Image (spheres, grey):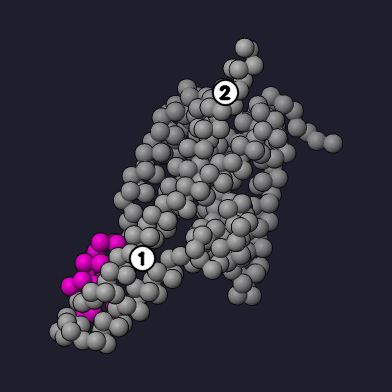
Amino acid sequence: MTNYRPGNPQSMPPVVKNIIIINVLIVLLQFALGKSGINLADYLGLHYWASPLFRWWQPLTHMFMHGDPYDVQQTLMHIGFNMFALWMFGRILENMWGPKRFLIFYIVCGLGAAVCHMGVLTFEYTRFYNDFLHYQAHPGYSEFLIFMRHHGLDINPVYLKEWAQFPSSPDAIRQSVDFLNTHYTGMINEATVGASGAVFGVLFAFAYLFPNTELLLIFPPIPVKAKWVVTVYALIELFSGIQNSAGDNVAHFAHLGGMLFAFLLLRIWNNKASNRFY
């Protein structure tokens, strides 16, 4: 038996409810395993396709994980925002579409976000690796500084001041190559987690279907139409993704990817619905 009632925006439909439950349970499992020194993101988080940690199931499983098992505050904020947005907007969509269509939509948006994120990483990491190969062929103090600035890296190796006094030091050159190699390895082995891509797809679908519905912002507390809220969100994500600031660990293009695939899927469904009349 279920309390699901199609068309009732106030009911808690089964897919949204179970997605929230699964996400909460996995976060609890992350914390439990983290106490034993096991990071579940190494297995279920999304890794770059060229990483030795990449597994075929990660484009799906990464969207059910959140935060860092060693940072409670960050994890609670991450899952809290995503699950609140899913509950607020996802239940309306599921009650309108039904469980099957909503689940397909949610998974497609999450997978689409992963595809877009991998595409951006491939572009960024390939450029970094090619520049790294060029640096290895022509290493030097000035070349190292140019490389670091070009890729937005902090220039803080402890040997840098000493290297400035002896630019031709072979030890400093070797350390710089080791530093960049370690940095590259760390990049490709970093895991991406979170339901944000799928949730941003849900936000887009709500604004697409109910563009003039007014949403009350938290700060400042003023009503704004859904279409403008999502438009501003998308522009912020695009700007932040292009900016690529040092220390920014948010997958902005994954969020945009979720929106993009939401738009494509909605268009496909609309075209199929229209074709039934011909």
Residue 199 visible, this orientation: no
Q: Pick whichever, 2 or 56, lies toward us.
A: 56
Helix, strand or loop for disc 2: helix
Residue 82 in percent (x, y) is at 55, 46
Q: Earlier in the sequence, mark 1 or mark 2?
A: 1
- Of the two numbered discs 1 and 2 in the rendering, the one whose residue sits closer to the viewer: 1
Label 1: how many Cα within 10 Å (few below 14, some 14–19, many 20+): some
What residue does disc 1 label?
129
* Residue 191 part of the magenta segment: no
* Residue 144 part of the magenta segment: yes
Residue 139, above or below 224: below
What residue does disc 2 label?
270
Which residue: 62% across, 12% down? 278
Quadrant of the rendered image containing residue 14: top right
Q: Pick whichever, 278 or 243, lies toward us.
A: 278
Residue 224 in percent (x, y) is at 43, 28
Which residue: 40% across, 75% down? 182
Residue type at numbered disc 1: Tyr
Quadrant of the rendered image containing residue 273: top right
Image: magenta residue range: 142-161
Residue type at numbered disc 2: Asn
